[in-house]
Amino acid sequence: MPLSRSYSVTLHTLLVAMAAVNVVLVLQNHQLKNPPAPQPSLLEPGDTVTTQPMLDLSGNPATLTWDQSQQRDRMLFVYTTTCPACRENQAAWRALYTDLAEHVDVVGVSLDGLDAARVYHAEHGLPYPVVVPADRQQFSQVFEISAVPLTLHISPSGEVRNAWLGGLTAERLHTIESMISPSGDRG
């Protein structure tokens, strides 16, 4: 028995609609299985940070303080000893230290324990002082650290002037040096 024309059109319309719904469901399933990567949080210019208890590499108490009497801004180089990007970034941080140490206080912050930080410091011959947070979790919360390497420029009062997440390209190095060095020159 032949199908009526209206029944045939209705059947084809339903098949097309079902195919469209199937495509939408497949796309939604893919999105659920592959959610976008969360964006790391990052301190913004104008945010403020609080004094943090630290340990120097000898294990003695040290403190990252924020006090107007300091007179100098501070650059923090935050890293872990197992991070390949941090290892690659050490050359850029050395250049910043060499070029800017007369204008800002530079401090490396290892997010690893003292033993790992000591070994890393010795192996890589870091020219700047390094400290380790006494409470890594608290430090990471205050500084909103979700990824490294992280370069922070902070005023004496604890106000974040700038934050750079990831490796420092030649362009970023030039930008940082121009912002901090009165002459904007290297060296």
Image (cartoon, grey):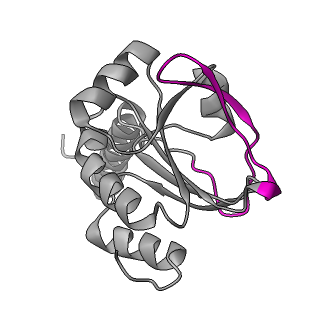
Find out whether residue 6 is within the magenta segment.
no
Kindly identify the residue that appears in the image at 52 percent across and 76 percent down.
Answer: 179
Q: Can you say which quadrant of the picture contains the N terminus?
A: top left
Which residue of the protein is positioned furthest toward the bottom in this rendering? 183
Residue drawn at x 79%, y 51% as measured from the top left? 67
Q: On screen, 52 above or below 18?
A: above
Q: Is residue 173 above or below residue 101?
A: below
Q: Residue at x 36, y 60 (%)?
A: 98
Q: How many marks?
A: 0
Magenta-colored segment: predominant secondary structure: loop
Asked whether 161 or 62 is in front, the reply is 62
The residue under the point 53% across, 82% down is 182
Between 159 and 37, the residue placed more toward the observer is 159
Q: Residue furthest right?
A: 68
Query: What percent of the width, then of the height, locates residue 55?
Result: 58, 23
Asked which quadrant contains residue 177, the reply is: bottom left
Q: Residue furthest left?
A: 1
Relative depth, front residue between 30 and 76: 76
Residue 39 percent coordinates (x, y): 49, 47
Where is residue 118 drawn, in percent x and y?
36, 22
Query: Which of the image's four quarters has the C terminus?
Result: bottom left
Q: Would you place residue 169 above or below residue 106 in this image? A: below
Where in the figure is residue 94, as x and y percent of width and height?
32, 53
Can residue 167 be seen here? The reply is no
- Asked whether the viewer can see residue 102, the reply is yes
Which contiguous range is marked in magenta? 42-69
Query: Is residue 76 rendered to the left or right of residue 160?
Result: left
Is residue 52 inside the magenta stretch?
Answer: yes
